[in-house]
Amino acid sequence: MSNISINIERVNHLLKLYGLTKDEFLMRVSAGLKNPLKEEDIFRSEIKISLLKKIDKVFGKGLNYYLDPKQLREAKEESIFFRKDEFNAELNLSAKKIVNHFEEEKISLSAISKLSDIKQERLLPIFTLKNTPQKVAKEIRTKLYPTFSNTKREFLTSLIGKFADYNILVFEFVETWNKTEKVNINGFYLSPDTIVLKRNQKSFSREIFTLIHELGHYLLNEEEIDESINEDSSNYSSLNKIERWCNDFAYYFLVGEHDKTIIKLESASKNNDYHHAILNSISEQTNLSVFALYTRLLMNGKVSLVNYKKIYSELFESIKKREAEENRLREIEKQKALDEGKKLGGAVAKPILSPLYLNTIQSAFYEGVINEAEFCRRLIVRHQRRGRHEPERAGERL
């Protein structure tokens, strides 16, 4: 097979961007090969197309990326990985690729907005750690808290819509079930106006809390990538000041006036059934998890650490049993469908799209900044010619 000329400096740039050593990179490229590849096999100006495909399997940038002769440089404007050295997560490669993807989306959307003459200035003030999270939450609730729904996905969608009203862009991504290396982050904030969330199908309460936690980072204008948002951890005191501020802000934003009930509760004990009924009721009225509410009791000195760990363990086991039962019933349904000769299938979960994103892409199309194919690609709709070459409106398909 003939060789193809590549810009090897682009491979070196990706290694710097993702913090990969050449040995780690060679190990990934050599996955599945009987004879591992060596440095001289890859780091050259011409390589086989089959090898280039193996390289791109690691980075997922598309083959044209490596053919582009344009030189790249480390720039803080390009990536959070060049702006920060440490994060609240030990990021695996899948997580780094997701962060880089949405960083590129953010930069691209910003350029499209400017070309479309769309102004997206910040509408909310920047706070500091000197501002108490409770007071800030009360102020921000008046602007960003939507009509409540205890259907958690609907509530999450409404929150994302409210954020859009204040020029805060939220991306949600859905990870496929068969992905080899799972992304090990829950969410992150990219300055100046972008929040990214990982879909948490098993716990929308956790995803909602993560969104508001990242809103805290936006309000402090402190970029961060978080692996685990500790809404249900007894190690609260080990968090740094910014993470504690963001967690407290998220709690107060979601709990609202129900915090008064939490404050008035006497110490949780066996005698009052550890306030299970009250906390379950508050959970249903706020979309805060029961875990988060018990964590707040612990912080308020209203439950002992021993009892907290006992309750936590019982709640965790209850969730595991429920999930196991749901999986069992799902398998029964699958087997029944197979026995009846029905074709198995199911809709792939789709990410929630921010109205801010939709409106920006629509405006860019109508202004001629992007073409129909780009419009459809970005809104994940089928590209097909219609009456006067107009795309379907986003709301008709999404």
Image (cartoon, rainbow, N blue to C red):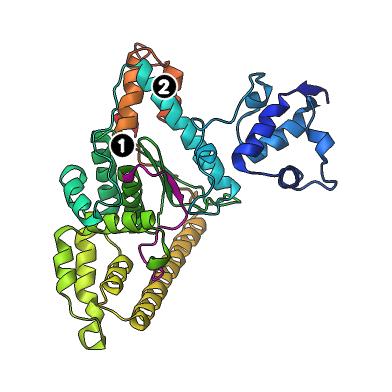
Name which residue type carries label 2.
Ala
- The residue identified by callout 2 is 111
> Residue placed at 51% from the left, 59% from the top?
339
User: Is 102 or 349 nearer to us in this picture?
Assistant: 102
Image quarter for residue 133?
A: bottom left
Q: Which residues are magenta?
A: 220-235
Local packing at callout 2 (Cα closer than 10 Å; few below 14, some 14-19, many 20+) is few
Quadrant containing the N terminus in the rendered view: top right
Name which residue type carries label 1.
Ile
In this rendering, does residue 150 appear at all? no
**In the drawing, does residue 140 fall left or right of residue 212?**
left
Image quarter for residue 260?
A: bottom left
**In the drawing, does residue 302 fall left or right of residue 347?**
left
- The residue identified by callout 1 is 168
Residue 336 lies within the magenta run: no
Determine the secondary structure under disc 2.
helix
Determine the secondary structure under disc 1.
loop
Residue 328, position as x, y percentages in the image: 46, 67
User: Is 100 or 177 nearer to us in this picture?
Assistant: 100
Residue 227 lies within the magenta run: yes
Image quarter for residue 375?
A: top left
**In the drawing, does residue 396 fall left or right of residue 42?**
left
Real-space CA distance between mark 2 and mark 1, rounded to the nearest whole angstrom: 16 Å
